[in-house]
Amino acid sequence: MKSDGQFFAVSPLMIFPETRGDFKIFLKSGDREVLYTQEMELFTEQHRKRLADNGVEDIYILANQRSAFERYMERHISFILDNPDLPVEERAQVFMDASNNAAREVFEDHLPKSLRLRKHHFERIQSLISQSLLFVSTEQALSKLSGLMSHDFKLYTHSIHCFIYLICLLSTYKLEDSTLLAAGMGAILHDLGKTALPRELLTTHPTQLKGMDMEAYRSHPVRGAAICSMVPLEHETLNCILMHHERMDSTGFPARAHSDSIPLVVRALSVVNAYDNLTTSRTMIRSMTPFQALNHMRDEMKGAFDKDVYKRLVMTLAGANIT
Ligand SMILES: [Fe+2]
Ligand SMILES: [Fe+2]
């Protein structure tokens, strides 16, 4: 979702016919936002047709109604993504649109403009992103993603954030495109196991969980791999799901793996995952600024991350030319 001060933009495909959302929808006319539908107004097929006929690519929602929009997505997205009556291409398009919205937000609000200016590099990143999204747009994967989006929409946007950071970070290494694509898919699916956990657990900060709750939380990488057991995945993707909480100093979970057995793509995912968790407020704990988060990772989580990967994340976020 692209944010624009007091509004954020979403694709018209994110508003589903015959549904009501507890938020207003605006259209842009010149520099102004004009009210299109009211809160709880029935959004009809005619509304959608009018938008399509007029070539409207973005509709706008008030930033302070973001959580109402997220609840709406949780309620309705599975009717689209899991609907066997809809062609898979149409469902994939809705998923791609939702993902492109979330990706655009990262590019516009969280990554330096200089990244876009290095045209050749940026075009490669964009092409990898489109290919990865296509890659996960299969019937089986869409149903898993539908589970992720309808369980907790914030968990899904977190996955897309991690995906974008990961592709940008890994683009600074000389890796095969196929490795990058498999890692990108791993980033999108890495927290899928959380859909097997109660939502209350996801709104509590992991450091505040105790006993059985902590055990359950720590089982999410293994649960994620189990949920994906019927989806054909590359080993890099599976590693990302299973190992993204492993740490370089062997303090991670589920296996307290040794650094030697943690592949580069997983080390990178573990860094961007921590960074997005610290900079985005999903629990009652306030989020940090990028500067605070990077300092926290360096000082308070000392030894947890691969130093070279961490350094490359800092340089990517600073817009340094490291390709
Ligand atoms: Fe996780
Ligand atoms: Fe995560």
Image (spheres, rainbow, N blue to C red):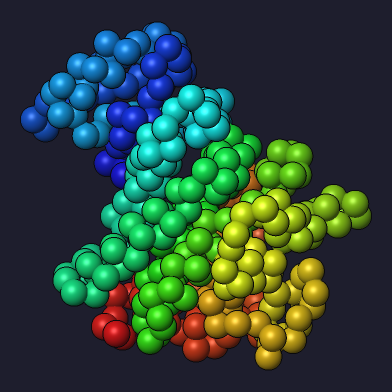
Instruction: Please state, as top left, top right, bottom left or bottom right, where the C terminus lies in the image.
Output: bottom left
Left or right: 150 with respect to 165?
right
Q: Is residue 23 left or right of residue 122?
A: right
| Left or right placement of residue 183 versus residue 191 in this view | left
The answer to whether one can see residue 110 in this image is no
Which residue is depicted at the point 63% across and 67% down? 238
Residue at 90% from the left image edge and 51% from the top image edge: 212
Image quadrant assignment for residue 58: top left
User: At x 29% / y 64%, what residue is drawn?
Assistant: 127
Provide residue 226's location: percent of width, then percent of height. Answer: 74, 56
Picture quarter containing residue 181?
bottom left
Q: Is the residue 99 above or below the residue 206 in the image?
A: above
Q: Position of residue 84 (x, y in %)?
A: 52, 29
Q: Percent from the top left, x then y, of residue 215?
A: 86, 57
Q: Depth check: give the residue in front, 256 or 224.
A: 224
Is 170 placed above or below 145 here? below
> Is 122 in front, or is 301?
122
Is 144 drawn above or below residue 63 in the view shown? below
* In the image, residue 53 above or below residue 302: above
Which residue corresponds to the image point at 58% horizontal and 56% vertical from the top-left? 189
Most extreme residue toward the right, as rendered? 211
Q: Nearer the viewer, residue 11 or 199?
A: 11
Instruction: Determine if residue 40 is in view.
Output: yes
Q: How many marks?
A: 0
Residue 183: give x, y in percent of width and height: 51, 69
